[in-house]
Image (cartoon, helix red, strand yellow):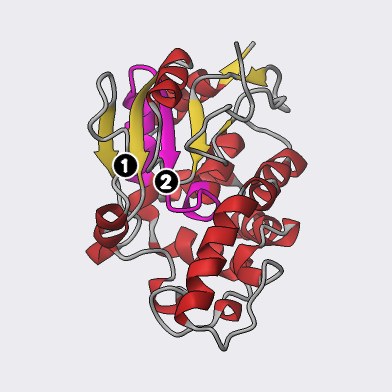
Amino acid sequence: MQYRRLPLEGLKNARDLGGYPSQSGGVTRFGQFIRCEAPRALTSGDIEIIKSCGVTDSIDFRGDNEVAAHPNSLASADGFIYHRCPTFDKQLAFAAANHPLKGRPAMDAFVDWGEKYIELASNAKAWVKTTLGIMAKARGGVIFNCTTGKDRTGVISALLLGIADAAEADIIADYCVSELYLTEVYREILEEYLKRWPGETANLSSPFFRTAPENMGTLLEHIKTAYGGVMGYLESCGLMADELSRLREKLVAG
């Protein structure tokens, strides 16, 4: 059975990139690339569902502190190759200096996610190259995660759908739905935050929790203007033609 959003007990935002039409013809395949938040509490049934999708590889974008706090359930599960592919040098979490549970107590520090994504795309090209290189070589499907599955994971998802020549509206829509599926996860984050800083007035409408269309739209427009599109950007990251061809073969059927 094919799922867009996987019916898992331990993940709320596990979604397959299959089922999107390619503007060049065909449709993205199910079971090749699955995005999610940190898989830290998977049940044995969850693991079997992920296996049934054809997944063989797990890629974790989190830094050392994030992984130590919440180990990846797939790291020790039979049948999976687990890859650590941290986004930043020194294993920093995304925007760790302003993270509401790490640095200053201000969730509203995250005002312009679009600019953050441009900064990520510009400064983490080696990470993009390594990540997509692993994906191109994977024997089966790949499940990939950061902490909430919306930012680091969202950028890689957008690039994959760009390789597939998905419509910009579909790429943005795939990004936007995270804030709906992550509501339960966000409530837990907010509860912990308010326990540590009870005088704060943060709520779920804070920019920290949002996956607004303009966030991803800003990144895609930058990639189009600066590199001529996703393929030009990936070439600037050092991806080779055979790797991009392999990824497209994995991504698109028909």
Classed neighbour count for the residue bearing mark 1: other residues with Cα under 10 Å, few (<14), some (14–19), many (≥20): many
Q: Quadrant of the N terminus?
A: top right
The reply to whether the C-beta atoms of the residues labelled 2 and 1 are less than 8 Å apart is: yes
What is the residue that sits farthest to the right in this orientation? Answer: 169
Residue 215 % position (x, y): 67, 61
Q: Secondary structure at mark 1?
A: loop
Asked if residue 92 lies in the magenta stretch, the reply is no
Residue 28 % position (x, y): 62, 22
Locate residue 64 relative to residue 219 in the image: left or right. left
Does residue 238 show up? no
Identify the mark at residue 151; answer none if there is no mark.
none
Locate residue 24 relative to residue 105 in the image: left or right. right
Q: Residue at x 60, y 38 (%)?
A: 162
Q: Nearer the viewer, residue 40 or 29?
A: 40
Q: Residue at x 66, y 53 (%)?
A: 179
Vertical arrangement, residue 70 with respect to residue 48, above or below? below
Give the mark, 2 or 1, whose residue is nearer the N terminus.
2
Q: Which range is magenta?
A: 129-153
Q: Residue at x 55, y 52 (%)?
A: 150
Q: Residue at x 57, y 41 (%)?
A: 13
Locate residue 153 relative to residue 23 in the image: left or right. left
Vertical arrangement, residue 172 with respect to residue 69, above or below? above
Residue 63 % position (x, y): 29, 57
Q: Which amino acid type is marked by label 2?
A: Ala
How many numbered discs sit on the rendered protein?
2
Identify the mark at residue 38; answer none if there is no mark.
2
Q: Which amino acid type is marked by label 1?
A: Asn
Q: Nearer the viewer, residue 30 or 167?
A: 30
- Residue at the disc numbered 1: 72
Whole-angstrom CA distance, mark 2 to mark 1, is 7 Å
Q: Secondary structure at mark 2?
A: loop
Q: Nearer the viewer, residue 179 or 144?
A: 179
